[in-house]
Image (spheres, helix red, strand yellow):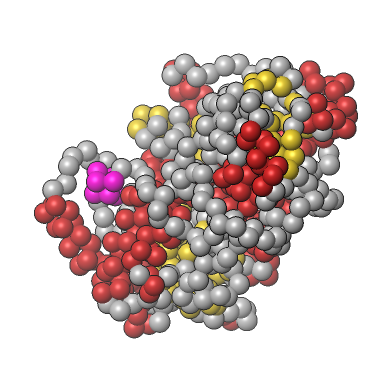
Amino acid sequence: MSVELQYCEDLFRYQRRKSREVTVGNVKMGGGNPVVVQSMITSDTRDTEACVAEVLQLAEAGCQIVRITAQTKKYAANLENIRDGVRAAGCDVPLVADIHFKPDAAFEAAKWVEKIRVNPGNYADKKKFEIREYTDEQYAEELERIREEFEPLVTLCKDLGRAMRIGTNHGSLSDRIMNRYGDTPLGMVESALEFARLAREQDYHNFAFSMKASNPKVMIEAYRLLVARLASEGPDWNYPLHLGVTEAGDGEDGRIKSAIGIGSLLADGIGDTIRVSLTEDAVHEVPVAQALVIEAKSLPTGKITEAFAPSWNPFEYERRKSEIISRNDHRLGGTELVRVFTSREKYDAVSHKLDQMGDYQPEIVIEDSEIRAIDPRDASAIQKINEASEAQLVTVSDGIDLAPIAAFRLLAARLDARHIILLKDTLKPKSDDFLPTLLRGAMTIGSLICDGIGDAIIMQGESAPGQSLRLSYNILQASGARIFKTDYVACPSCGRTLFNLQDTTQNIRAATGHLKGVRIAVMGCIVNGPGEMADADFGYVGGAPGKINLYVGKQAVKFNIPEAEAVERLQDLIREHGKWIDAPAQAVEI
């Protein structure tokens, strides 16, 4: 993808993207309005009382838009009762129907809720994983068939004043898109634009886009490419964007993965509404989303007066080509592992129990590393380093008034590529609550790693030595820079889920958490199952109530396994493919 495309006006200075305003009930998003926080209930849509209670709980927590699954017309019809119950309770939070596969469910839902979410990959589209080439004529025939299914919904939404989200998921691209564009960010964008063009032909503009993926790198690239493509289409294509990392998982890992994907885009001024997707009770998603918005708004705004071109391609990941040096018996730079630094004070605090810390090892002490810290705006400092005969280890000085992402991007743009860069989560270490510290670190370091910048990292914002090391490694894992433990792709619960996702995910973690480098997907249903498992080694997917299908990659290999046996059968499947090892002795908790 050409770097001539631009997804934001200035990669070194925050400017919020200018989008048109879209109205969802009484909520306005885009058009300069504050970023809107969304979530999704997990109750069965047929259970009116449970759905109403969960919507009210989310609204009380500060959720501004609530989504509800509507998998069939029968489920969608009960949205009327849910809406009436919510309104009778004095709550005016807008409701969204989540539609997959069933156009008739969308038509029914549009009668009762303020917004319809459609997924271009499975709304009136084929998804059989057929492998064949589409001729231009066949491609046009497919688009015409989609037009016949989609245009009536557009007309209905326009007549009723409903909003729409054209929400592409990396895991559910159609055969047609997959065969022409592949499983790529470009395919995601093209899938959404096809539906947007049909909407615009009906003079319907009250819609937003999303480009969700479980891999933050893919998600970031897809949104950047979408923004660039929208800008190239013309100034009236400035539709608002809904941000989210789908199947982020739970706990610390889910929050870190979400902060990398959502936070990095917010930091570039992209995003008008967000949802943090956690495999937890939905109410826990809201404070994380709110904190992410606060972090993005509170970035330092120091000036970079000169214009600089980026030294990386924002639309295609490639690690910066630095040379290799050695520090503390560890190799840094090039294609070596991204190393974890710590301070002398923190190292001394944990040095007596290094053999008990498992994989969360401090690798290099910053005071012993011969590092050069500079303000990247200082031309003379940059020149001295670039004139050095050997590659240098360099970082940004603490205390300067630049946002860390901008500062390190500028450093990477001005330094010769041979020099090694140490990333920091913050340039102004301060005592803060754990959640903001976690989100800030993931947003900053994760964003830069996804840009291909950084050969080592240090967490300065977290004062607890062991905790700062754990966060460092977990950020590297979530950004795909250093896989040192089992990686889980776990979707959030919703009304489609065919088993208890939270309990099952924890059971699978307990059984497989020691398998370093193995990626396991835990999916409540088939909506995003095979596609979002593109990078997973194994998958655990709800096939029917009480029954589980097991996957190897995208291929289902075991069917209708009783839920009580499924975790053990997953372990057997991992053994069959030679990826099982016995669990080691338990390391101490840090």
Q: Is residue 389 above or below residue 104?
A: above
Measured as percent of width and height from the top left, residue 73 is found at: 35, 66
Instruction: Examine the rendering and report whether any part of residue 568 can be seen.
Output: no
Q: Which residues are magenta?
A: 174-181
Residue 507 position in % (x across, y down) = 60, 34
Task: Point out the residue furthest to the left here.
Answer: 137
> In the rendered image, which quarter is residue 413 located in?
top right
Q: Is 87 drawn above or below residue 558 in the view shown?
A: below
Main secondary structure along the magenta-highlighted residues:
helix
Residue under the point 13% across and 48% down: 135
**Left-right relation of 368 to 242:** right
Q: Is residue 43 above or below residue 347?
A: below
Residue 366 lies in the magenta stretch = no
**Residue 373 appears in the figure:** yes
Q: Residue at x 55, y 50 (%)?
A: 261
In front of the other: 119 or 435: 435
Q: Quadrant of residue 6?
A: bottom left
The location of residue 510, given as percent across then percent down, is: 63, 30
As for residue 179 lying within the magenta part, the answer is yes
Residue under the image location 14 percent in, 52 percent down: 136
- Image x and y of residue 240, in percent: 47, 68
Quarter of the figure that contains the C terminus: top right
Q: How many marks?
A: 0
443 with respect to 533 (left or right) = right
Q: Residue at x 71, y 17 (%)?
A: 329
